[in-house]
Image (cartoon, coloured by chain):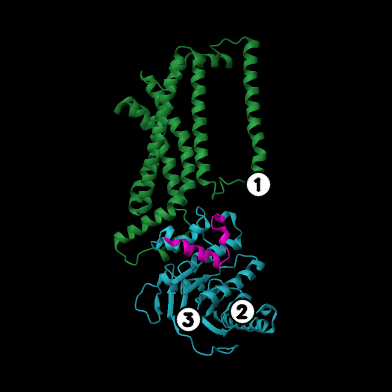
Amino acid sequence: MAPGRRQGTPLRVVLPLAIFAAAIAAWEAVVRLKGIPPYILPAPSLIARTMAADWPLLQSSLLTTLGTTLAGLALAVIGGVGLAVLLSLSRIVEYSLYPFAVVLQVTPVIAIAPLLLIYMPQDVAVLACAWLVAFFPVLSNTMLGLQSVDRNLMELFQLYGAPASHSPLARLGARLKALWYLRRPAALPAFLAGLRIAGGLSLIGAVVAEMAAGSAGAGSGLAYRIIESQYRLNIPRLFAALVLLAATGIGLFLALAALNHVLLRHWHESAAPRDP
Amino acid sequence: MIRVAMPMTQPAPTLVSLQGISKVFSNGVTALAGFDLDVFTGEFVSLLGPSGCGKSTVLRLVAGLTEPTQGRVAWAGMRRDDHRHEIGFVFQDPTLMPWANVADNVWLPLRLRGMSRRDARDRIAESLALVGLSDFAKAYPRELSGGMRMRVSIARALSLKPRLLLMDEPFAALDEITRFRLNDDLLRLQGDLRCTIVFVTHSVYESAYLSSRVAVMSARPGRVVAEIDGEPSGPRAKDFRTSTRYVQLCARISQVLLDQTSEERL
């Protein structure tokens, strides 16, 4: 089990790193040999130097975008999980609210961004955008998870746990108990899958909103730096901002994957070590 | 009605009695019609019949998980309606919580009854010892074999010290070697705990081996068409599975089933 996984690990890390290094080297070589001007395609070394030189500016932009992304994700988790729990407790609530959540999802958020910028202050609008795109995967995955409890386990619950009385309050109590003991743990894998999707989407939402806001004249996130660098033909800085955005996405993905592993490694197939 | 073995020397008191039960599902299917069965204290009664004859429905009725359309489930000598604390239920699948370790799975019924993990510790250890899994308390279900998972499921059903154990084809999905061993373990458990067992199966051989009484059911709508006495409750002799007595029991039960199916064809 575990040894088999460990055996493959060095190769799984070394191989992509080697290919990455080779691609960077080839890029550097092509730019130098052909003498491509930096405003067309900057060499990786120049991008690294720009990153170091512009670091104070880029760092504050990075923190802004990262903050928006994480805040959007956190709000999406609170809203998505909260609504999913509400919907799972009552059919009436589910029927009346779920269609609206779907409408929110299928409307391309980039189309909403300019509107949000009119109605809200800049930073709130950007945050709202990140929240909007991250919200639905959390909601739909958590709902799926909450409904995926083994039917026999629910019967066991009924046999051992449900109160004999049939008053609405007692029924709600039994549902809350089932929610805590059975549905909450059963929903965890699906919720975490939703969270991983939402993490990436939250970053996209933040970038899209920053771009929309940036063209309106203000903002200081990484996406705004990209637009600004484009206007000024400061292509090395554009690339540096792009690298930071990619790094943010990778970091977010790795953090959420690690969370997934820590929470599920004991019992869920998706996180369990497997034979090669 | 055919009586193969000698009846018990003294009649045991009735524990629960199903009287004139019909069950019609909401989709219009009649699962049971005119179903009568008395379950006596301390016996091991098997419900044997073809798939879909309503065997599982009988267990669910006894457990109070569903209500009869007609007829009643009468518990002897007790006024209260709620008998759920006296019942242990084992499904065909182990139905363990995959996210909880073995001890926590066994804890579930006690926990639902409001018992803290600390108070339940001895009961959990006791239940696990009964099924021979004391060393696996911290293991997760996915790390166990099918037979061990079923043992955990049985330990969970035993944690409330039920007077009545309802088992719905619990060993049907296991290989024969594991099944034989669990058959013997179950009989030993019943001897130790002195509980009553209602056991649903579609295996003639399993019912002949385990039961002190086999109730043969007709195809849907199900009812009891014959009752055959088997060996008295308790562990079996080592050579029972190869004894003429066992072979005769199997033949007897098979014959009843055959007669039953040919009657239905006519």
Q: Which corner quadrant of the image does residue B191 belong to?
A: bottom right
User: Mark 1: few, some, or many residues within 10 Å (few <14, many ≥20)?
Assistant: few
Colour of chain B in the image? cyan
> Residue A16, located in which quarter of the rendered image?
top right
- For image coordinates 43% across by 58% down, the residue present is B118
Which mark, by number, is residue A275?
1
The lab-note entry on whether marks 2 and 1 share a chain reads no
Instruction: Provide residue A98's location: percent of width, then percent of height.
Output: 37, 46
Q: Which of A49 and B219 is in front in this view?
A: A49
Q: In which quarter of the image is residue A27?
A: top right
CA neighbours of label 2 inside 10 A, class few (<14), some (14 to 19), many (20+): many
Q: Does the magenta stretch include residue B136?
A: yes
Compute the Cα span from label 2 to label 3: 19 Å
Give the letter of the green chain: A
Asked whether A211 or A183 is in front, the reply is: A183
Instruction: Kindly state the secondary structure of the residue where label 2 is placed.
Output: helix
| Residue position for label 2 | B208
The chain letter for the residue carrying disc 2 is B
Q: Position of residue A258 (x, y in %)?
A: 52, 38
The amino acid type of the residue labelled 1 equals: Asp
Q: Mark 1 lies on which chain?
A: A
